Amino acid sequence: MDQRKQFIVDTNVLLEDPECIRKLRNGIENDVFVPYHVLLELNKLKKDARLAHIAAKVVKNLLEDRDKYVVLDTDKVAEPFQDLVDGYILDEVQRSGLAEPILVTNDKILQLLAAKRGIKSEFYRESVPFKSDAEYFTGFVASREERVPNCFFWEEGKPVFWGRDEEGRFEEKAVSYQHKVWNVTPRNVYQNLAIELLTNPCIDVVSIQSEAGYGKSFLALAAALHLVLERKDQRKIYVVKPMIEIGQKLGYLPGGVEEKMEPYTRYVGDLMSKLHATRPANRLFLDAEQYPPKFDPKKFELLPLNYIRGMTIENAVVIIDEMQNMSRSECRALLSRMGEGVKCFCLGDIRQVDHPYLNQENNGLNWLVKKFKGAENYAHLVLKGEKSRGPITDLVIKSGL
Protein backbone atom coordinates (compact mmCIF):
# COMPACT_ATOMS: atom_id res chain seq x y z
CA MET A 1 0.00 0.00 0.00
CA ASP A 2 1.36 3.43 -0.97
CA GLN A 3 2.01 5.49 2.18
CA ARG A 4 3.12 8.64 0.34
CA LYS A 5 1.59 11.83 1.69
CA GLN A 6 0.80 14.97 -0.26
CA PHE A 7 1.71 18.01 1.84
CA ILE A 8 0.74 21.56 0.87
CA VAL A 9 2.77 24.16 2.75
CA ASP A 10 1.36 27.45 4.03
CA THR A 11 3.37 30.68 4.29
CA ASN A 12 3.63 30.68 8.10
CA VAL A 13 5.27 27.24 8.08
CA LEU A 14 7.90 28.32 5.54
CA LEU A 15 8.68 31.42 7.61
CA GLU A 16 8.95 29.46 10.85
CA ASP A 17 11.20 26.79 9.33
CA PRO A 18 12.79 27.58 5.95
CA GLU A 19 13.95 23.94 5.84
CA CYS A 20 10.40 22.56 6.19
CA ILE A 21 10.10 21.32 2.59
CA ARG A 22 13.07 19.00 3.00
CA LYS A 23 11.75 17.77 6.35
CA LEU A 24 8.23 17.17 5.07
CA ARG A 25 9.55 15.40 1.99
CA ASN A 26 11.63 13.10 4.24
CA GLY A 27 14.00 12.01 1.52
CA ILE A 28 11.65 10.89 -1.27
CA GLU A 29 8.94 9.53 1.01
CA ASN A 30 6.37 12.31 0.50
CA ASP A 31 5.33 14.88 -2.09
CA VAL A 32 5.35 18.60 -1.24
CA PHE A 33 3.39 21.36 -2.97
CA VAL A 34 3.60 25.16 -2.64
CA PRO A 35 0.54 27.26 -3.53
CA TYR A 36 1.07 30.02 -6.07
CA HIS A 37 -0.38 32.54 -3.61
CA VAL A 38 2.19 31.54 -0.99
CA LEU A 39 4.87 32.71 -3.43
CA LEU A 40 2.99 36.01 -3.82
CA GLU A 41 2.92 36.41 -0.03
CA LEU A 42 6.66 35.77 0.18
CA ASN A 43 7.27 38.38 -2.50
CA LYS A 44 5.31 40.93 -0.46
CA LEU A 45 7.16 40.00 2.75
CA LYS A 46 10.52 40.77 1.13
CA LYS A 47 9.62 44.43 1.69
CA ASP A 48 8.72 43.96 5.36
CA ALA A 49 11.71 44.90 7.56
CA ARG A 50 10.52 42.55 10.32
CA LEU A 51 10.47 39.45 8.13
CA ALA A 52 12.54 40.28 5.05
CA HIS A 53 15.59 38.31 6.20
CA ILE A 54 13.47 35.21 6.85
CA ALA A 55 11.58 35.56 3.56
CA ALA A 56 14.90 35.87 1.73
CA LYS A 57 16.11 32.63 3.33
CA VAL A 58 12.88 30.87 2.31
CA VAL A 59 13.20 32.08 -1.30
CA LYS A 60 16.85 30.97 -1.41
CA ASN A 61 15.85 27.47 -0.27
CA LEU A 62 12.99 27.36 -2.78
CA LEU A 63 15.42 28.18 -5.57
CA GLU A 64 17.91 25.54 -4.43
CA ASP A 65 15.23 22.86 -3.99
CA ARG A 66 13.16 23.39 -7.13
CA ASP A 67 13.12 19.64 -7.79
CA LYS A 68 11.72 18.87 -4.31
CA TYR A 69 8.29 20.53 -4.64
CA VAL A 70 5.64 21.49 -7.17
CA VAL A 71 3.99 24.91 -7.40
CA LEU A 72 0.20 24.66 -7.64
CA ASP A 73 -1.65 26.34 -10.49
CA THR A 74 -4.26 29.06 -10.08
CA ASP A 75 -6.93 30.38 -12.41
CA LYS A 76 -7.31 33.72 -10.60
CA VAL A 77 -4.96 35.96 -8.63
CA ALA A 78 -5.76 37.94 -5.49
CA GLU A 79 -5.80 41.72 -5.77
CA PRO A 80 -2.67 43.09 -4.01
CA PHE A 81 -3.35 44.72 -0.63
CA GLN A 82 -7.10 44.01 -0.98
CA ASP A 83 -7.86 40.29 -0.85
CA LEU A 84 -6.90 37.86 1.85
CA VAL A 85 -5.13 34.98 0.14
CA ASP A 86 -6.46 32.20 2.39
CA GLY A 87 -9.46 31.55 0.14
CA TYR A 88 -7.27 31.54 -2.96
CA ILE A 89 -4.91 28.99 -1.36
CA LEU A 90 -7.86 26.72 -0.60
CA ASP A 91 -9.10 27.14 -4.19
CA GLU A 92 -5.69 25.99 -5.44
CA VAL A 93 -5.81 22.94 -3.18
CA GLN A 94 -9.28 21.98 -4.41
CA ARG A 95 -8.46 22.33 -8.10
CA SER A 96 -5.08 20.58 -7.76
CA GLY A 97 -6.56 17.14 -8.41
CA LEU A 98 -4.54 15.63 -5.57
CA ALA A 99 -6.08 12.51 -4.08
CA GLU A 100 -5.53 13.23 -0.35
CA PRO A 101 -3.91 16.65 0.09
CA ILE A 102 -2.86 17.69 3.60
CA LEU A 103 -2.59 21.43 4.20
CA VAL A 104 0.25 22.08 6.67
CA THR A 105 -0.42 25.37 8.49
CA ASN A 106 -0.16 26.84 11.97
CA ASP A 107 -3.06 29.19 11.21
CA LYS A 108 -6.05 27.86 13.18
CA ILE A 109 -8.56 29.96 11.23
CA LEU A 110 -7.23 28.57 7.94
CA GLN A 111 -7.58 25.08 9.40
CA LEU A 112 -11.25 25.80 10.18
CA LEU A 113 -11.84 27.15 6.67
CA ALA A 114 -10.11 24.10 5.19
CA ALA A 115 -12.29 21.74 7.24
CA LYS A 116 -15.42 23.50 5.94
CA ARG A 117 -14.30 22.65 2.41
CA GLY A 118 -13.41 19.07 3.33
CA ILE A 119 -9.66 19.67 3.12
CA LYS A 120 -7.53 17.85 5.68
CA SER A 121 -5.05 20.01 7.59
CA GLU A 122 -2.52 19.66 10.39
CA PHE A 123 -0.02 21.72 12.36
CA TYR A 124 3.63 21.63 11.37
CA ARG A 125 4.94 19.17 13.95
CA GLU A 126 8.45 20.64 13.99
CA SER A 127 6.99 24.02 14.88
CA VAL A 128 4.35 23.76 17.60
CA PRO A 129 5.29 22.43 21.05
CA PHE A 130 2.77 20.20 22.78
CA LYS A 131 2.02 22.83 25.40
CA SER A 132 3.14 26.23 26.58
CA ASP A 133 6.12 25.14 28.66
CA ALA A 134 7.21 28.68 29.57
CA GLU A 135 4.00 29.09 31.56
CA TYR A 136 3.28 25.58 32.79
CA PHE A 137 6.80 24.93 34.08
CA THR A 138 6.96 27.60 36.76
CA GLY A 139 10.43 26.79 38.08
CA PHE A 140 8.83 24.87 40.94
CA VAL A 141 8.31 21.10 41.17
CA ALA A 142 5.80 19.30 43.38
CA SER A 143 8.28 17.04 45.18
CA ARG A 144 11.90 15.93 45.40
CA GLU A 145 11.16 13.05 43.03
CA GLU A 146 10.37 15.54 40.24
CA ARG A 147 13.49 17.69 40.69
CA VAL A 148 15.36 19.08 37.70
CA PRO A 149 18.55 21.16 37.90
CA ASN A 150 18.06 24.68 39.29
CA CYS A 151 14.45 24.26 40.37
CA PHE A 152 12.58 25.08 43.57
CA PHE A 153 10.12 23.17 45.73
CA TRP A 154 8.23 24.14 48.87
CA GLU A 155 9.08 22.63 52.24
CA GLU A 156 7.41 23.79 55.46
CA GLY A 157 6.31 26.97 53.72
CA LYS A 158 9.82 27.90 52.52
CA PRO A 159 11.28 27.60 49.03
CA VAL A 160 14.14 25.11 48.67
CA PHE A 161 16.60 25.42 45.78
CA TRP A 162 18.09 22.35 44.08
CA GLY A 163 21.28 23.28 42.24
CA ARG A 164 25.04 23.17 42.20
CA ASP A 165 27.27 24.59 44.91
CA GLU A 166 30.55 26.38 44.24
CA GLU A 167 32.34 23.03 43.90
CA GLY A 168 29.86 21.80 41.31
CA ARG A 169 27.97 19.36 43.53
CA PHE A 170 24.17 19.38 43.62
CA GLU A 171 22.65 20.24 46.95
CA GLU A 172 19.43 21.45 48.54
CA LYS A 173 19.42 24.95 49.96
CA ALA A 174 16.55 26.64 51.79
CA VAL A 175 16.18 30.21 50.51
CA SER A 176 15.21 31.72 53.85
CA TYR A 177 17.29 34.86 53.34
CA GLN A 178 16.49 38.00 51.40
CA HIS A 179 18.66 39.17 48.53
CA LYS A 180 19.61 42.76 47.87
CA VAL A 181 21.31 43.72 44.60
CA TRP A 182 22.27 47.25 43.66
CA ASN A 183 20.23 48.45 46.66
CA VAL A 184 17.14 46.77 45.21
CA THR A 185 15.14 44.75 47.73
CA PRO A 186 12.71 42.14 46.33
CA ARG A 187 9.02 42.92 46.87
CA ASN A 188 7.96 39.28 47.24
CA VAL A 189 9.34 35.74 47.46
CA TYR A 190 9.27 35.21 43.70
CA GLN A 191 11.37 38.30 43.01
CA ASN A 192 13.79 37.08 45.66
CA LEU A 193 14.06 33.71 43.92
CA ALA A 194 14.55 35.44 40.57
CA ILE A 195 17.60 37.23 42.00
CA GLU A 196 18.80 33.89 43.39
CA LEU A 197 18.88 32.55 39.82
CA LEU A 198 20.11 35.72 38.09
CA THR A 199 23.16 36.02 40.36
CA ASN A 200 23.99 32.29 40.64
CA PRO A 201 27.50 31.79 39.17
CA CYS A 202 26.69 28.21 38.12
CA ILE A 203 23.78 29.21 35.87
CA ASP A 204 24.54 30.63 32.41
CA VAL A 205 20.99 31.08 31.06
CA VAL A 206 17.97 32.25 33.07
CA SER A 207 14.51 32.72 31.56
CA ILE A 208 11.79 34.66 33.36
CA GLN A 209 8.14 34.56 32.29
CA SER A 210 5.57 36.94 33.73
CA GLU A 211 2.82 39.32 32.84
CA ALA A 212 3.66 43.01 32.64
CA GLY A 213 4.44 44.77 35.87
CA TYR A 214 6.13 42.09 37.95
CA GLY A 215 9.56 43.65 37.59
CA LYS A 216 11.45 41.20 35.40
CA SER A 217 13.28 43.92 33.42
CA PHE A 218 14.10 45.94 36.55
CA LEU A 219 15.44 42.87 38.39
CA ALA A 220 17.47 41.75 35.35
CA LEU A 221 19.10 45.18 35.01
CA ALA A 222 19.82 45.36 38.76
CA ALA A 223 21.40 41.90 38.66
CA ALA A 224 23.43 42.90 35.57
CA LEU A 225 24.79 45.99 37.36
CA HIS A 226 25.69 43.81 40.34
CA LEU A 227 27.55 41.29 38.14
CA VAL A 228 29.38 43.85 35.97
CA LEU A 229 30.17 46.73 38.32
CA GLU A 230 30.26 45.07 41.73
CA ARG A 231 31.27 41.44 41.28
CA LYS A 232 33.08 42.16 37.99
CA ASP A 233 32.20 38.70 36.65
CA GLN A 234 31.48 40.26 33.24
CA ARG A 235 32.69 43.43 31.52
CA LYS A 236 29.66 44.72 29.63
CA ILE A 237 25.85 44.69 29.46
CA TYR A 238 23.88 44.19 26.24
CA VAL A 239 20.11 44.64 25.99
CA VAL A 240 18.71 42.95 22.88
CA LYS A 241 15.15 43.45 21.68
CA PRO A 242 13.23 42.12 18.66
CA MET A 243 11.91 45.26 16.99
CA ILE A 244 8.42 44.00 16.12
CA GLU A 245 6.69 47.35 16.65
CA ILE A 246 8.97 49.32 14.33
CA GLY A 247 8.55 47.37 11.13
CA GLN A 248 9.75 49.34 8.11
CA LYS A 249 9.91 52.60 10.07
CA LEU A 250 13.23 51.69 11.74
CA GLY A 251 15.31 52.44 8.67
CA TYR A 252 13.73 55.85 8.18
CA LEU A 253 14.24 57.15 11.70
CA PRO A 254 17.12 59.62 12.01
CA GLY A 255 20.42 58.91 13.76
CA GLY A 256 22.38 55.79 14.63
CA VAL A 257 21.19 52.49 16.02
CA GLU A 258 20.63 53.77 19.56
CA GLU A 259 18.71 56.83 18.33
CA LYS A 260 16.53 54.66 16.07
CA MET A 261 15.70 52.36 18.96
CA GLU A 262 15.14 55.10 21.53
CA PRO A 263 11.32 55.37 21.20
CA TYR A 264 11.03 51.62 21.76
CA THR A 265 13.64 51.18 24.49
CA ARG A 266 13.04 54.33 26.51
CA TYR A 267 11.82 52.17 29.38
CA VAL A 268 15.37 50.76 29.65
CA GLY A 269 16.77 54.27 30.08
CA ASP A 270 14.08 55.03 32.67
CA LEU A 271 14.89 51.87 34.63
CA MET A 272 18.63 52.51 34.45
CA SER A 273 18.11 56.08 35.69
CA LYS A 274 16.05 54.72 38.56
CA LEU A 275 18.77 52.21 39.45
CA HIS A 276 21.44 54.91 39.11
CA ALA A 277 19.48 57.06 41.59
CA THR A 278 19.30 54.11 43.97
CA ARG A 279 23.03 53.51 43.73
CA PRO A 280 25.37 55.40 41.34
CA ALA A 281 26.47 53.48 38.23
CA ASN A 282 28.64 56.23 36.72
CA ARG A 283 30.84 53.87 34.71
CA LEU A 284 27.89 52.92 32.50
CA PHE A 285 27.10 56.46 31.38
CA LEU A 286 28.67 59.09 29.20
CA ASP A 287 26.05 61.48 30.56
CA ALA A 288 23.62 60.24 33.21
CA GLU A 289 22.00 63.67 33.51
CA GLN A 290 20.87 63.73 29.87
CA TYR A 291 17.40 62.34 29.08
CA PRO A 292 17.27 59.75 27.81
CA PRO A 293 20.64 58.94 29.43
CA LYS A 294 23.62 58.46 27.12
CA PHE A 295 25.41 55.17 27.74
CA ASP A 296 29.09 54.35 27.33
CA PRO A 297 29.09 51.76 24.49
CA LYS A 298 32.12 50.08 26.09
CA LYS A 299 29.95 49.18 29.08
CA PHE A 300 26.30 49.21 27.92
CA GLU A 301 24.63 48.75 24.54
CA LEU A 302 21.06 48.54 23.28
CA LEU A 303 20.82 46.46 20.12
CA PRO A 304 17.97 45.33 17.84
CA LEU A 305 17.94 41.61 17.13
CA ASN A 306 19.24 41.85 13.57
CA TYR A 307 22.42 43.65 14.66
CA ILE A 308 23.56 40.55 16.58
CA ARG A 309 24.02 38.54 13.39
CA GLY A 310 27.71 37.88 12.79
CA MET A 311 28.75 39.03 16.27
CA THR A 312 30.49 36.93 18.91
CA ILE A 313 29.64 38.14 22.41
CA GLU A 314 32.02 37.35 25.26
CA ASN A 315 32.37 38.33 28.94
CA ALA A 316 29.03 40.09 29.04
CA VAL A 317 25.58 40.01 30.57
CA VAL A 318 23.05 39.76 27.72
CA ILE A 319 19.44 40.69 28.51
CA ILE A 320 17.04 39.50 25.80
CA ASP A 321 13.76 41.31 26.26
CA GLU A 322 10.41 40.26 24.78
CA MET A 323 11.75 36.88 23.70
CA GLN A 324 8.18 35.77 22.98
CA ASN A 325 8.43 37.87 19.80
CA MET A 326 11.33 35.83 18.47
CA SER A 327 10.91 32.75 16.30
CA ARG A 328 12.63 29.48 17.10
CA SER A 329 15.24 30.07 14.38
CA GLU A 330 15.92 33.62 15.59
CA CYS A 331 16.29 32.32 19.15
CA ARG A 332 18.77 29.70 17.97
CA ALA A 333 20.72 32.23 15.86
CA LEU A 334 20.96 34.70 18.76
CA LEU A 335 21.98 32.24 21.47
CA SER A 336 24.61 30.73 19.19
CA ARG A 337 26.37 34.14 19.23
CA MET A 338 27.22 33.70 22.92
CA GLY A 339 30.88 32.94 23.63
CA GLU A 340 32.89 32.51 26.82
CA GLY A 341 31.94 34.29 30.04
CA VAL A 342 28.38 35.17 29.02
CA LYS A 343 25.42 35.32 31.39
CA CYS A 344 22.12 35.46 29.50
CA PHE A 345 18.78 36.67 30.89
CA CYS A 346 15.77 35.85 28.68
CA LEU A 347 12.62 37.80 29.54
CA GLY A 348 9.13 37.68 28.15
CA ASP A 349 5.41 37.14 28.42
CA ILE A 350 3.95 34.46 26.16
CA ARG A 351 0.52 36.07 26.53
CA GLN A 352 1.74 39.16 24.70
CA VAL A 353 2.96 37.85 21.35
CA ASP A 354 3.03 40.70 18.80
CA HIS A 355 4.82 38.83 16.01
CA PRO A 356 2.27 38.12 13.23
CA TYR A 357 3.54 34.57 12.62
CA LEU A 358 4.00 33.41 16.21
CA ASN A 359 1.60 32.42 18.97
CA GLN A 360 1.47 31.51 22.66
CA GLU A 361 2.93 28.06 22.03
CA ASN A 362 5.21 28.76 19.09
CA ASN A 363 7.68 31.48 20.16
CA GLY A 364 11.30 31.82 21.21
CA LEU A 365 10.70 31.93 24.96
CA ASN A 366 8.56 28.81 24.94
CA TRP A 367 11.04 26.95 22.74
CA LEU A 368 13.87 27.92 25.09
CA VAL A 369 12.09 26.42 28.09
CA LYS A 370 11.04 23.31 26.14
CA LYS A 371 14.58 22.57 24.90
CA PHE A 372 16.74 23.82 27.81
CA LYS A 373 14.72 22.48 30.75
CA GLY A 374 16.87 20.01 32.68
CA ALA A 375 20.23 21.45 31.60
CA GLU A 376 22.60 21.98 34.52
CA ASN A 377 23.41 25.59 33.56
CA TYR A 378 19.83 26.71 32.83
CA ALA A 379 16.98 27.90 35.07
CA HIS A 380 13.45 29.18 34.54
CA LEU A 381 11.01 31.01 36.79
CA VAL A 382 7.47 32.35 36.44
CA LEU A 383 7.16 35.55 38.46
CA LYS A 384 4.02 35.92 40.53
CA GLY A 385 2.87 38.06 43.42
CA GLU A 386 0.10 40.09 44.93
CA LYS A 387 1.52 43.45 43.89
CA SER A 388 3.05 44.54 40.61
CA ARG A 389 4.32 47.97 39.51
CA GLY A 390 1.30 49.82 40.89
CA PRO A 391 -2.41 49.71 41.81
CA ILE A 392 -3.65 50.17 38.22
CA THR A 393 -1.49 47.32 36.94
CA ASP A 394 -2.68 45.25 39.92
CA LEU A 395 -6.25 45.87 38.80
CA VAL A 396 -5.47 44.91 35.18
CA ILE A 397 -3.91 41.60 36.31
CA LYS A 398 -6.60 40.83 38.87
CA SER A 399 -9.49 41.56 36.50
CA GLY A 400 -7.95 39.75 33.55
CA LEU A 401 -8.43 42.82 31.32
Image (cartoon, rainbow, N blue to C red):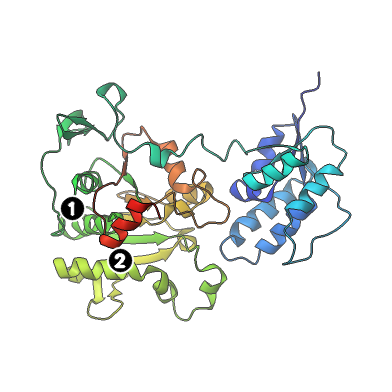
Q: Is residue 270 above or below residue 370?
A: below
User: Residue 300's mark?
Assistant: 2
Amino acid of disc 2:
Phe
Q: Residue 79: x, y in percent?
A: 79, 65
Image quadrant where one finds the N terminus: top right
Q: Which mark is residue 6?
A: none
Disc 1 marks which residue? 187
Mark 1 Cα shell of 10 Å, populated few (<14), some (14-19), many (≥20): some
Q: Secondary structure at mark 2?
A: strand
Q: In the orientation shown, which residue stands out farthest toward the left? A: 177
Is residue 336 rendered to the left or right of residue 390?
right
Quadrant in which residue 156 is drawn = top left
Q: Is residue 280 visible?
A: no
Q: In the rendering, at what x and y percent does residue 324 appear?
A: 45, 51
In the rendered view, does 235 fall on the left or right side of 112? left
Q: Secondary structure at mark 1?
A: loop
Amino acid type of disc 1?
Answer: Arg
Precedes in sequence: disc 2 or disc 1: 1
> Whole-percent x and y of residue 369?
41, 40
Please tell me whether mark 2 or mark 1 is closer to you in this view: 1
